[in-house]
Amino acid sequence: MNRRHALTTSLLWTLLATPLLAVGCSTGPDDEVEHASAAATPGSPATRFALAESCSRLMKRHESVRPIDLEQGVIRWGCGDVTGVTDPDLGQEYCEYQAVQNGRIVRKPSDLTTGPVTCVFTSVFTGANQASRLRPQMANPANLGAAAATESIVEMQRSFNTRSAAVDLVRACSSRGSDSGATSRLRTAACYQAYEAGGPNADRLRTLCRDALTDAGWAEAQTLGAKILTSGQPGYEAQRDIAGCMSVTGAGVAWRNSDPMICSRVSRSAGECSCRFNSVPSSLVGFAFTGWVDDHIPSSCRLAVVDGAPYPYLALCTLSAQEVSDLPLNPQYNRAISNFCHDRFGKDLVMKLPLRALQAQDTCSESPGFCADYMDADSESALPSSPADDVVDGSSRL
Amino acid sequence: MILDHRRGRLGACALFVLASACASTSDGDMLSSSSAVTESDELAELAKVVGNDRIGRAVRSAPAAIPYRVDGVEALLGIGRRCARSDSKEIWVAEEMSSRLTGEQVLTSMLSPRLVVGGCASDDTALRRTFELFLAVVSDPARDPSDPLSTTSVEAMALDETTGLYNFYVLEPPATEGAPGTVTRFVRTANDAVEKWQKISGRPATKGPNADRKCFNCHVHGDPIMNELTDPWTNWVSSRKTFSRPLTSTSRELVSESRPFEGEHGRSSLANLLQPVVEASIGMWVEGLPEQPGSGLGQQILDGHQPGGVRGLLRSVFCETTVNYASVFDTVPIALFADLSVTRFASIKAPVAPVGSPWTLLPVRAEVDLRIERFLQKADVLRPDTVLAIRLLDDANDVFSAKRCAVHGSLAADLVPASVDAAVRDAVLAAANADRTLPSSSRALVRALVGPSVTSDERDAAEAAYISDLGARIASDVEKLEMSSGRQELEHRWRERQAKARALFPTAANPLPITLRP
């Protein structure tokens, strides 16, 4: 396959992706909504309404695994980047990945020699200082059979994938649980739900709820069907989840899987249950790989063996011979094998943040519903924290 | 003894996935003799029917105890509930308001489960162990709705280690109580006839033509079928979907393995992970077993052991021999706007789905056809540039393209692999030059890909111009998602494709998802 079009196509995708993927990007900026970030990633929602829509999609994507998350007191999200993140910027979800052969990163099929090709997924936090220990362990035949040639194979490198960024995200989202914007987010979520229900008022609701709702605007939205729901009413949990998700603005990046999902649960727990959370402890070197409905990673992948035991922060997924021979025939994979890693393995490698275990002792109310279901402290003991855990380096998810 | 008379009377096809019922039973028509064979002959007679696969080896190892109930087959083969894996029993579940117990689609009053059981890999082995054997278990509308799965008579497809093709089996209750089960196998021959090979306990093996295509009504080439090979795997239990209602008894026990109902265990078999299994199975089934030269559908066809010849294989590149499906979830399937090959070439991805467009099951290019296309390239029958040029002839339609199919129809019937690429290039170039409706950028790129004496600069320019033009065309089409009238137009397009899928499978024995039932 001819590869000369790579630059042209990258440019095209950049041009085309923004209008396709960023709903509402053509509208003006909103004071609470961030602007689009790097060109190789999707545009961020440009209005409150677009943010609510993005959050609603995210929640629907996780609807079927939500009860399991609540029961276990965790937050799950996919390692695989969302549609619209292109190969130079893959690795947005506290999980970075690349293809490796003989211990070295192979970016294109033309780089391949002989030996197994493995997509290596690492969730070891950037700066966790684990690489020197992990690199030689990859020489274990159960792993790669060769020491990792570079740190980036075993430890994440992006600045927003630090433990400090996770601490910052949880802290920021916690503070938004009951901040002055909470009511406004709830109104927008209610407005979005009324829009989503369809009917003759949908277009007007969309216009009304684009920006921050004034009292007059909210009054009109209510006459058109928007309603802040109370516990037990159909749609209540979804409304609260959307509103919680919207608090990601300023704390993280709205189009990712991870940030809005984390923010939704954290801000709800803080706002509705009065929970306070400890820092992500330094004993946690990353977010563990898991499955969507249980704790098994997909059978095509395996956890690396480190010091003789499965290591939950490194997943190895070896390509079949046929998959290797297919790579040059798909222009996406011919350009970057990491795209293959994303499509074939990344979507079903799941990350897990043990939120319940982070709660500060005796801070969460156990009121029935979300709080009792999700934050019941009796269900699981908290992770140990240490003074050093509160030290942050200034990095963030933004 | 329990004889399932409904299955015995009818039976037709569609083993896997939304599927079942290759069923047969001893109708007697083809039995050349009802005289008993000696005990020592039993094994030799059985060997005439079965293939070099896990089913064949298992029944030959226990000819006096051939099972015909699901639990017996699970025990014999170490699969399903007897699978030793700790993370999954490889029991995947779909549900539809239909039953395929007879091989034909029959509407039911409520959603009913349909199971696919894999061959049970150990925890850390490749997918092959899983896909070398698939069992189908389907619901019986006559049973109690709380326990609807029919567990007597078992249908299976097993990967043959000599041919690399799937062998289709039915293990049925015996004619005589207490005897081993009857083994029936349906075989597609080199001249595209379907034969029924059968071994009834105590009788000689029989082989004969079958008037109905049976399994091959749905499994067009003898392939595994999973209709929606992409997120959200409509109708399947997955990370997106739980089973819809409570069940009891054996049905509950089996369905629970897809996702536990109430946390009763820590295993799962999600459609998310069936997808790569099916894709890998189709890959090996088409391209062959690495250790067995000459195996696999592609080579078997080229060598004349399976029907169609190289011209038949080319149909997968120009037209379609079957279809898969894609639904709106996070995004709208890109196939609604353009051919997958060209969007990959241009790095264009699917647009975000608008609110309120819950469209499901758009017919899209089949994994089988895509795999045959890859096989032809790996076998040096077609060059990658030639394949892309073919798709450019109608880049708006990944399936049901009259333009591309017309060019396929113009190809000579007696093509031989060594000269295929040149013949196809000539035909494609001629078609592109003759088609005044073809966008000029497409025509220019076709010329650059398959025409004579093209410089590198000329080709680069043609690629850039085409990608720019394609991007603009798709962006214009995608904008329709933002307007009610535009969405109506796209929905109409969607329905038209579904109608064409129905036309592709006009009989009641078909692999169509229930919502596309004729």
Image (tube, rainbow, N blue to C red):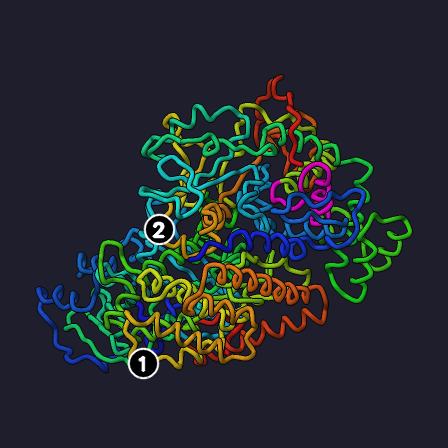
Residue A375 position by quadrant: top right
Q: What's under tag 1, amino acid-wise?
A: Ala
On the rendered structure, is A119 left or right of B497? left
Residue nearest the viewer, comparing A26 with B192: A26
Q: What's under tag 2, amino acid-wise?
A: Leu
Residue at the spot x=49%, y=48% of the render?
A339
Q: Position of residue A354 (x, y in %)?
A: 57, 33
Residue at the spot x=13%, y=66% of the render?
B42
Q: What residue is pinned by disc 1?
A: B413
Tell me the quadrant of the picture where the N terminus of chain B can be found.
Answer: bottom left
Q: Is residue A218 above or below residue A270?
A: below
Q: Chain of mark 2?
A: B
Q: Is residue A231 above or below residue B480?
A: above
Residue A44 in view, yes or no: yes
Closest to the camera, between mark 1 and mark 2, is 1
Q: Position of residue B21 (x, y in %)?
A: 36, 70
Q: What residue is pinned by disc 2?
A: B127
**Mark 2: secondary structure:** loop
> Magenta residues, as a range?
A237-258
Q: Chain of mark 1?
A: B
